[in-house]
Every structure is written in structure tokens, then in C-alpha cells.
Image: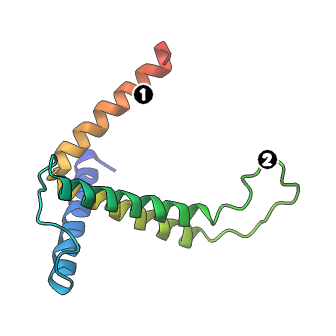
Amino acid sequence: MGDKKKEDMLISIFRLREEFMLRINEKIPGVYPPWPVVLSDKASQQSLRESALKGVEEMFEALQHLKNWKPHRVTEIKEFNREEFLEETVDAFNYFFSLLVMMGVTPEEFFNAYVKKDTTIHRRLEVGY
């Protein structure tokens, strides 16, 4: 898959999330504050924190599907519902993408920040952390 296609998917994810946020605010006013938020504003920080915690909560829901992680567990549970695990992970990402939208982050800015961090962590592998 080419870089352009990946870029289009990222742009689509941002668009879909923002469209949802607008729709939910029409049905339930105030669920999300007007964005981009003022990052130094107390109410804005509270909204960002709330969205982040919801994303963390969804990740915990995903983690509940992992039954074989305990090193002391002798028996392994062979059943695993990949679809439910993926759904909970997507739920978490939705909240994290809401954070980005509320902050006014663009797909390009997110991608550039991701690449910058990726470069950093690869360099740490080479030179140590």
C-alpha cells in the first residue's frame, strides 16, 4: 500500500471522528467543547482529560479480553474474540482522536509528530536510552 493511500486513510479517520463529534454535539449539546480548545484554559483541560480517561477506560475493556498474560497461570484459555478486542481498541482510539481534534491537530501535524517520535525511538535502539 502506497504512502498516499495511508495518508488518505489517516485524513479519513480525522474527518470521520470530527463528523461524529459534530453530530453528537447536535443531539447532546456540550458533550464536546467548541474546538480547537484553548489549551491553557481550565475547562478545556478538563475536557481533554475526560476524553483521555475515556480512551484509557476503553483500553482497559480491551485488555479484559487477554486472559493468558499472567506468568503464573498454568492453563491457557484458547478462546479469543479478536473482533471484540479490536472493537474496544477502536473505541479507545476514537477518544484519543477526539483529543487531537479538540486540540486542533491536523492529520499532517499528527503524522509529522508520529514520524518524529518514531525516529527518536529507533535512534534509542541504536544508541541506548
Q: For the residue marked with disc 1, what is the amino acid?
A: Ile
Please name the colour scheme applied to the rendered image.
rainbow
Look at mark 1 in the image and give the residue it sits on.
Answer: 121
Q: Can the viewer see residue 15?
A: yes
Query: How far across and how far down the image is residue 123, in percent?
Result: 41, 20
Residue at 15% x, 46% y: name it.
40
Look at mark 2 in the image and give the residue it sits on.
Answer: 71
Instruction: Using the image as rendered, state which of residue 83 and residue 26 is in the foreground.
Output: 26
Q: CA distance from mark 1 to mark 2?
A: 28 Å
Tell which tag, 1 or 2, sits nearer the viewer: 2
- What is the secondary structure assignment of the residue under circle 1? helix
Q: Residue furthest front?
A: 42
Q: For the residue marked with disc 2, what is the amino acid?
A: Pro
- What is the secondary structure assignment of the residue under circle 2? loop
Query: How far across and how far down the image is residue 118, in percent?
Result: 37, 32
Q: Residue furthest bottom?
A: 27
Q: Residue furthest top?
A: 127
Residue at 50% x, 66% y: name it.
86
Instruction: Using the image as rendered, state which of residue 46 and residue 32 is in the foreground.
Output: 46
Residue at 14% x, 53% y: name it.
104
Query: In this rendering, is residue 117 above or below 94?
Result: above
In the displayed structure image, the side of residue 2 where residue 109 appears, left or right: left
Q: Can the viewer see residue 9?
A: no
In the displayed structure image, the side of residue 58 where residue 17 appears, left or right: left
Residue at 36% x, 57% y: name it.
52
Query: In this rendering, is residue 127 above or below 75?
Result: above
* Image marks 1 and 2: residues in contact by CB distance under 8 Å: no
Mark 2 nearby-residue class (10 Å; few <14, some 14–19, many ≥20)? few
Query: How far across and how far down the image is residue 79, in percent?
Result: 73, 70
Query: How far across and how far down the image is residue 119, in percent?
Result: 35, 27
Find residue 63 and report its image quarter: bottom right
